[in-house]
Image: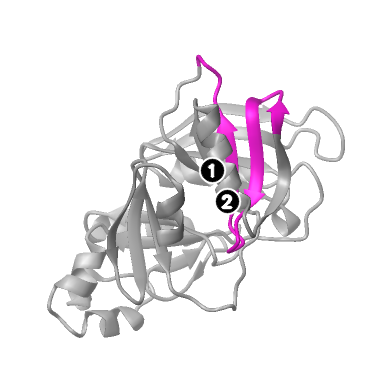
Amino acid sequence: MQYYIDIFDNAEMEFSNEIVAHGKMEGSPFLIITGNDQYLPNYSISVMVLSHDKEKINRYYKQLIRDGKELMPLNSYPFSEWYAWVVDKYGFSWQLYTAWENETIEHHFVPVIMFAGKQQGNCRKALELFKNVFPEFTLSEISEYPEGKVKGQVMHSRFKLNQNVVMAMDSGVEQDFNFNETISMVIECDDQKAIDHYWDGLIENGGEASKCGWLKDRFGMSWQIAPRNFNDLLFKSGNERAIENMMKMEKIILKDLL
């Protein structure tokens, strides 16, 4: 987490221990968990960093590309005055996007979901799933590939999941990777009813339960369905059995946690 805090503006660490680090970058929450090399990051989920400041994009590019690599060079494109897609030294990918002068930026950090490999062409179906599961779902933009093997598939979509901006697309070219557990989306819930709602909605029709509040939806995307005060419950409640109890769970059951 400290690596990213040193790179991005207005970034801060809120909580950290040997297991988890939680912080914010320009108001967007990030959670990093200690893991192993069972799963490695790929480009199925990247983070788009949006700014009107071209020099800021240049600075981020120079820092992220160090010991990393470039997927799309820093240049002018039809969709952005100044843009690059890079992979940092840990293997996580970032799309650095300079917004047009009249373009509104709601969130400076936005997850971008790319349906590729076995999930190629499923973006539109995923949007329908999100619409059915999230009470506050709004789709603001969607466009299709006009030609080629991917004609009619989703080239770009922009939507909100409970006030959080997300983008999604089908890959424009053939890819050999799929979603894995390296990057997951976290849904913070106020009570057990909300946990039950998101868990049941995302796992139905082919999803898969995992441990500690994790699941995969029918497309293989990983989600963490957790109480909003999860860190406090696990690490600040004074109950030494909280983590032990959590490790036995699939879906989080609040009354059994403490």
Q: Mark 2 belongs to which amino acid?
A: Leu
Q: Is label 1 in contact with label 2 (beta carbons under 8 Å)?
A: yes
Queried whether the magenta region covers residue 187, the answer comes back as no
Q: Is residue 241 above or below residue 1?
A: below
Q: Nearer the viewer, residue 119 or 158?
A: 158
Q: Residue at x 64, y 26 (%)?
A: 80
Label 2 sits on residue: 64
Q: Residue at x 71, y 23 (%)?
A: 78
Image coloring type: one colour
Query: On the picture, is 127 further left or further right than 195?
Result: right
Query: On the picture, is 243 further left or further right than 80?
Result: left
Q: Is residue 249 above or below residue 150?
A: below
| Disc assigned to residue 60 | 1
Q: Please, what is the dominant secondary structure of the magenta stretch?
A: strand
Q: Position of residue 17 (x, y in %)?
A: 30, 73
Q: Quadrant of residue 157?
A: top right
Query: Whole-Å distance between the Cαs marked 1 and 2?
Result: 6 Å
Q: Which residues are magenta?
A: 75-102
Q: Nearer the viewer, residue 157 or 22?
A: 22
Report the residue that reaches farthest toward the right: 148
Q: How many marks?
A: 2
Q: Is residue 172 above or below residue 31?
A: above
Q: Position of residue 91 (x, y in %)?
A: 62, 61
Q: Is residue 76 above or below residue 129?
A: above
Q: Nearer the viewer, residue 250 or 95?
A: 95
Q: Is residue 65 visible?
A: yes
Q: Mark 1 belongs to which amino acid?
A: Tyr
Query: Element at badge 1?
Result: helix
Of the 4 image quadrants, the one containing the N terminus is bottom left
